[in-house]
């Protein structure tokens, strides 16, 4: 089946751009050479944004086409689908078309509704007498906040790149260069401590003794990342605080988790500076193994960095990135494209990230189609270390990196795949509770929010089917 070009409805982004530039609809229409009525229709999503006008807007306002994507709307629609699957809404069902219309026409109202639902869920899970705040869990709040920024923080990314260019360019041993910098700039000596692991620590600064303690015999790439974290802690705390004060989550615990996230973001951007990393990624066709050897970092560090390459004007491929354990718990999840992770229940078992556990250390490639008909190229692999003794129980972890099928030819992982033939594309869903694929033999729960038909005169693949949406 040939790929069809989807229409781009960018009304919200057009309104945001016009208001950012302080323009009236009439002035904006004059700038890009369209009529006032046509501009109004575009902003109301009554008409798609044509390619010629998209190019004109990008040239006039120094933007890239990715700026006008409907990624945010897609995430909102997925959140609405999962939320409306809650049985509490069984008497007020909304069709997918209605949810799409709401996300496109009134995104702020949708955001308020989702916030209210999270508050409701929070209150349901805790005793009303002891719940002090109707707010989402801090981890969820930080995840939503990072998602709103498409996992890219410009000021911090540029600060990390500037540090690299001043201190590390051309260094064959960046960890030694960072150790020397900490000694000369901050007067801190590095010591190896054998009891760090037993104390649950990966590094510790002792300002009184002017020492930094690191675990004994840890992998090189871990040492490099921890040193970059420490430099961020010592030198970027003010910038991180400024970002959080201006636009960060408001809850105290969420702010503290966001601070940790930004510290980790700086560390990743320091050891993999944006411009140099993007250049090599494009030269190597996003081959993760080649990139990790070139930069002497881990598979996970490369995957995480690839999910952040959204600097305006020089964007890389928009990837989503998730890290899961063998039980399907999502440990990390970021997306720079339309992909949305499941908010309720476990991820879809048809996803290749679960096959990765059966082939440790080997890359699994899959073409998958989500319930919004978007097709992704997914790259999955396990990471982690072997046990140090019989009594040790190392955590089994896998991660998946995915991009839209339109970007797949830019990667080495599309080699040998017929991207125009969708016969073998695997249908995956957001979790059974919110997935409307009735014929899926992997379904473990009925879809919520719809009337069930158990089939009195026939038995289906699963013992329950949902009647079509009205």
Image (cartoon, rainbow, N blue to C red):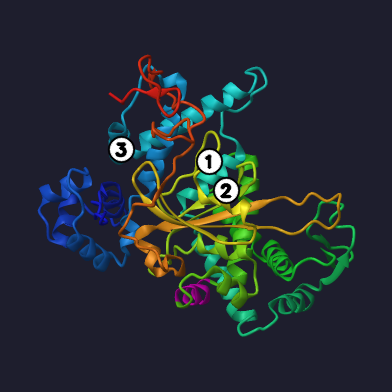
Residue 436: give x, y in percent of width and height. Answer: 39, 32
Residue located farthest toward the front when viewing the structure as drawn: 458
| Residue that badge 3 annotates | 100
Residue 226: give x, y in percent of width and height. Answer: 72, 64
- Kindly indicate the quadrant of the structure image that contains residue 460: top left
Magenta span covers which residues?
Answer: 274-282
| Residue that badge 1 annotates | 347
Depth-wise, is mark 3 or mark 2 nearer the camera?
Answer: 2
Residue 333: give x, y in percent of width and height. Answer: 55, 49
Q: Which of marks 3 and 2 is nearer the N terminus?
A: 3
Q: Residue at x 83, y 71 (%)?
A: 190
Query: Is residue 278 located in the magenta-colored stretch of the structure?
Result: yes
- Kindly indicate the quadrant of the structure image that contains residue 411: bottom left
State the SS at label 1: loop
Depth-wise, is mark 1 or mark 3 nearer the camera?
Answer: 1
Residue 263: in sight, yes or no? no
Q: Is residue 102 above or below residue 357?
A: above
Q: Is residue 119 above or below residue 153?
A: above
Give whichever of 383, 176 is nearer the camera: 383
Q: Residues within 10 Å of mark 2 (few under 14, many from 20)?
A: many
**In screen coordinates, is 433 left or right of 136?**
left
| Residue that badge 2 annotates | 354
Q: Residues within 10 Å of mark 1 (few under 14, many from 20)?
A: many
Q: Which of marks 1 and 3 is nearer the N terminus?
A: 3
Q: Residue at x 66, y 64 (%)?
A: 232
State the SS at label 2: helix
In which quadrant of the rendered image does the N terminus lie? bottom left
Q: Residue at x 21, y 54 (%)?
A: 49
Query: Is residue 90 located in the magenta-colored stretch of the structure?
Result: no
Residue 67: give x, y in percent of width and height. Answer: 34, 58
In which quadrant of the rendered image does the C terminus lie? top left
Kindly indicate whether the residue at mark 1 contacts the one at mark 2 (C-beta within 8 angstroms).
Answer: yes
């Amino acid at each position: 089946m040939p790929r069809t070009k989807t229409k781009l409805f960018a009304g919200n982004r057009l309104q945001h751009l016009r208001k950012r530039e302080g323009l009236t609809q009439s002035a904006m229409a004059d700038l890009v050479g369209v009529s006032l009525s046509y501009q109004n229709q575009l902003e109301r999503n009554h008409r798609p944004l044509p390619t010629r006008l998209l190019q004109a807007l990008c040239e006039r306002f120094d933007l890239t086409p990715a700026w006008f994507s409907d990624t945010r709307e897609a995430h909102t629609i997925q959140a609405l689908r999962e939320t409306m699957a809650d049985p509490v809404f069984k008497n007020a069902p909304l069709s997918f078309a209605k949810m799409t219309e709401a996300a496109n026409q009134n995104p702020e109202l949708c955001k308020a509704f989702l916030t209210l639902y999270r508050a409701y869920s929070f209150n349901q899970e805790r005793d009303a007498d002891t719940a002090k705040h109707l707010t989402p869990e801090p981890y969820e709040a930080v995840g939503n906040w990072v998602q709103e920024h498409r996992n890219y923080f410009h000021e911090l990314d540029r600060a990390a790149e500037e540090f690299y260019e001043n201190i590390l360019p051309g260094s064959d041993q960046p960890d030694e260069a960072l150790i020397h910098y900490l000694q000369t700039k901050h007067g801190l000596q590095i010591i190896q401590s054998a009891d760090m692991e037993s104390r649950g620590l990966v590094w510790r600064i002792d300002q009184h003794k002017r020492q930094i303690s690191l675990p004994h015999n840890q992998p090189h790439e871990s040492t490099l990342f921890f040193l970059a974290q420490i430099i961020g802690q010592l030198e970027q705390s003010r910038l991180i605080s400024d970002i959080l004060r201006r636009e960060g989550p408001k809850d105290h615990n969420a702010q503290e988790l966001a601070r940790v996230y930004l510290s980790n973001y700086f560390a990743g951007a320091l050891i993999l500076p944006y411009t140099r990393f993007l250049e090599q990624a494009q030269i190597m066709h996003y081959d993760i193994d080649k990139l990790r050897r070139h930069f002497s970092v881990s598979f996970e560090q490369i995957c995480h960095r690839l999910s952040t390459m959204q600097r305006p004007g020089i964007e890389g491929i928009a990837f989503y990135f998730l890290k899961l354990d063998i039980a399907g718990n999502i440990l990390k999840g970021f997306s720079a494209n339309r992909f949305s992770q499941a908010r309720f229940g476990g991820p879809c078992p048809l996803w290749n990230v679960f096959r990765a556990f059966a082939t440790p250390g080997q890359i699994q490639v899959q073409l998958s189609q989500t319930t919004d008909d978007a097709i992704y190229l997914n790259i999955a692999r396990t990471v982690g270390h072997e046990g140090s003794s019989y009594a040790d129980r190392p955590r089994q972890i896998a991660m998946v990196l995915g991009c839209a099928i339109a970007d797949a030819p830019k990667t080495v992982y599309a080699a040998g795949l017929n991207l125009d033939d969708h016969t073998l594309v695997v249908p995956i869903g957001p979790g059974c509770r919110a997935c409307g694929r009735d014929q899926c033999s992997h379904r473990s729960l009925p879809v919520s929010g719809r009337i069930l038909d158990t089939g009195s005169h026939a038995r289906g693949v699963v013992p329950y089917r949902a009647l079509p949406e009205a």
